[in-house]
Image (tube, rainbow, N blue to C red):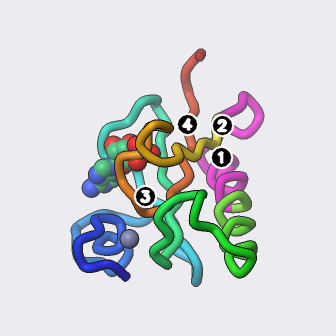
Amino acid sequence: MEKDCLFCNIVKGKTDTRFLLETDEAVVFKDINPHAPVHLLIVPKRHIRSINDLTDEDRPVVAELLMLGKKMARQQGVAEDGYKLLFNVEYGGGQRIFHLHLHLLAGKVW
Ligand code: AMP
Ligand code: ZN
């Protein structure tokens, strides 16, 4: 956990962010500035900066994020129509919060 990391603080329940789902490894909550009618963030509990920092030990966490993406798409009713699962990686890739997260976006025509 990193003291000044927003997503670490959200994971620890230090904000009023409501979780749509929580597992041992990750939490899911709504993006505060949605880019689509459905825009969720799937966030590992452990602080990992970005995709660049993943190690072999993180394989189960990565699998969990993707499986939660699939599960939440179904729960949100967008699985059949389709959706995006997106990792922004580092500043040039659009990442602005440096705690790994998977975006689930759906509900509009791209
Ligand atoms: P990224 O650009 O990939 O780092 O995505 C960070 C995302 O976090 C953006 O889509 C923001 O809108 C979102 N965000 C920032 N602060 C919060 C917050 N307090 N609660 C929920 N989502 C947030
Ligand atoms: Zn963090």
Q: Residues within 10 Å of mark 3 (few under 14, many from 20)?
A: some
Image quadrant assignment for residue 80 = top right
First-in-chain label (3 vs 2)? 3
- Residue receiving disc 2: 78
- Residue receiving disc 1: 73
Label 1 is placed on what type of residue?
Ala
Tell me whether the residue at label 4 lies in contact with that at label 2, contact meaning CB atoms closer than 8 angstroms.
no
* CA gap, disc 2 and disc 1: 5 Å
Image quadrant assignment for residue 17 = bottom left
- The stretch in magenta equals 68-83
Tell me whether the residue at label 3 lies in contact with that at label 4, contact meaning CB atoms closer than 8 angstroms.
no
Nearer to us in this view, 54 or 65:
54
Mark 3 Cβ inside 8 Å of ligand 1: yes
- Residue receiving disc 3: 29
* CA gap, disc 3 and disc 2: 16 Å
First-in-chain label (1 vs 4)? 1
User: The C terminus lies in which quarter of the figure?
Assistant: top right
Residue at 65% over, 53% down: 69
Q: Kindly identify which numbered label has been placed on residue 105.
A: 4
Identify the secondary structure beneath mark 3. Answer: strand
Identify the secondary structure beneath mark 1. Answer: helix
Is residue 93 positioned above or below 108 on the image?
Answer: below
Q: Is 89 placed left or right of 59 in the picture?
A: left
Tell me whether the residue at label 2 lies in contact with that at label 1, contact meaning CB atoms closer than 8 angstroms.
yes
Identify the secondary structure beneath mark 4. Answer: strand
The image shows residue 27 at horizontal and vertical percentages of 49, 69
First-in-chain label (2 vs 1)? 1
